[in-house]
């Protein structure tokens, strides 16, 4: 049996608009009424996020001072994963077609995400994605889980998945961050990193995935044509 374990945000869901709307909100909330700030265009903001520029530096680039930058970063952490903003998430181009290909090919598919149960359920309902992921193939955080760092929390999900899932002859992980790559490599799972998510190629290369591909569709095409992986 061939298994594909995929991250959710990045490969399947485009979160860039949510992150940008939260940035705009935090900038507006943090600036003084008479203060002139420089709201970054979405493309510039997203590239800073993808190259892992710290939140405080993004605040500085937008015209905030040191105290404001700290407030901005804290407000952003409190806001980015709240329900009103999840509404701005969209399906990544080609993601549903790729999921259909996996389903039709009979590949065992699991999702592994740092979303909480309620956050994953919301997206499943909004985008009609639950049909691809049975409950026993969904690995996410409980609603009351106290997060540490993704790079520490995600390997715990991988350990749980490998313990619970039936054996597979071959397994691949698809993700867009260092947490995905680390979780896979810690447990000997081959990993493809996609360039369509929240890390750019330079950041992904630092963690040495087995392959870097354009997006989820490209990853699925490679899994379906294993000769290309040799």
Image (cartoon, grey):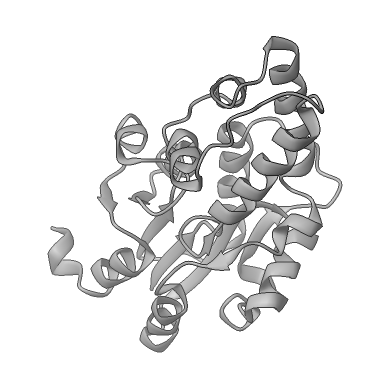
Q: Is residue 226 left or right of residue 201?
A: left
Could you tell me which residue is drawn at 38 percent across and 44 percent down?
A: 188
- Residue extending furthest toward the top: 66
Q: Is residue 57 left or right of residue 209?
A: right
Q: Is residue 69 visible?
A: yes
Query: Measured from the top left, where is residue 52 in percent x and y?
Result: 47, 30
> Quick check: 174 above or below 186?
below
Q: Is residue 144 left or right of residue 208?
A: right
- Residue 77 or residue 140, whichever sits in front: 77
> Quick check: 69 above or below 81?
above
Query: Measured from the top left, where is residue 184 in percent x and y?
Result: 44, 45
Query: Measured from the top left, where is residue 227 in percent x and y?
Result: 13, 68
- Residue 60 or residue 97, whichever sits in front: 60
- Residue 46 or residue 111, whichever sits in front: 46
- Residue extending furthest toward the bottom: 104
Query: Measured from the top left, where is residue 94 in percent x and y?
Result: 39, 74
Location of the C terminus (image quadrant): bottom left
Could you tell me which residue is drawn at 41 percent across and 56 percent down?
A: 174
Could you tell me which residue is drawn at 37 percent across and 83 percent down?
A: 101
Could you tell me which residue is drawn at 69 percent across and 72 percent down?
A: 135
Please identify the quarter of the rendering in which residue 228 is found: bottom left
């Amino acid at each position: 049996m061939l298994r594909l374990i995929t991250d959710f945000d990045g490969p399947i869901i485009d979160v860039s608009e949510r992150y940008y709307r939260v940035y705009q909100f935090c900038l507006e909330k943090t600036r003084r009424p008479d203060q002139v700030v420089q709201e970054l265009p979405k493309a510039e903001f997203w590239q800073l996020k993808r190259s892992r520029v710290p939140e405080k530096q993004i605040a500085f680039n937008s015209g905030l001072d040191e105290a404001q930058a700290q407030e901005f970063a804290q407000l952003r952490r409190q806001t980015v994963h709240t329900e009103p903003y999840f509404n701005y998430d969209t399906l990544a181009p080609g993601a549903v077609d790729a999921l259909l290909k996996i389903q039709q090919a009979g590949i065992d598919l699991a999702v592994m995400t740092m979303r909480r149960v309620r956050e994953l359920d919301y997206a499943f309902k909004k985008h009609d994605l639950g049909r691809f992921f049975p409950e026993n193939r969904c690995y996410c955080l409980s609603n009351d889980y106290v997060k540490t760092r993704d790079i520490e929390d995600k390997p715990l999900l991988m350990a749980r998945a490998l313990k619970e899932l039936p054996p597979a002859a071959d397994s691949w992980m698809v993700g867009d961050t260092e947490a995905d790559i680390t979780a896979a490599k810690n447990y000997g799972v081959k990993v493809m990193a996609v360039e369509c998510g929240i890390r750019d190629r330079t950041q992904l290369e630092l963690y040495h995935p087995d392959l870097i591909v354009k997006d989820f569709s490209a990853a699925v095409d490679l899994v379906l044509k294993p000769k290309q992986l040799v």
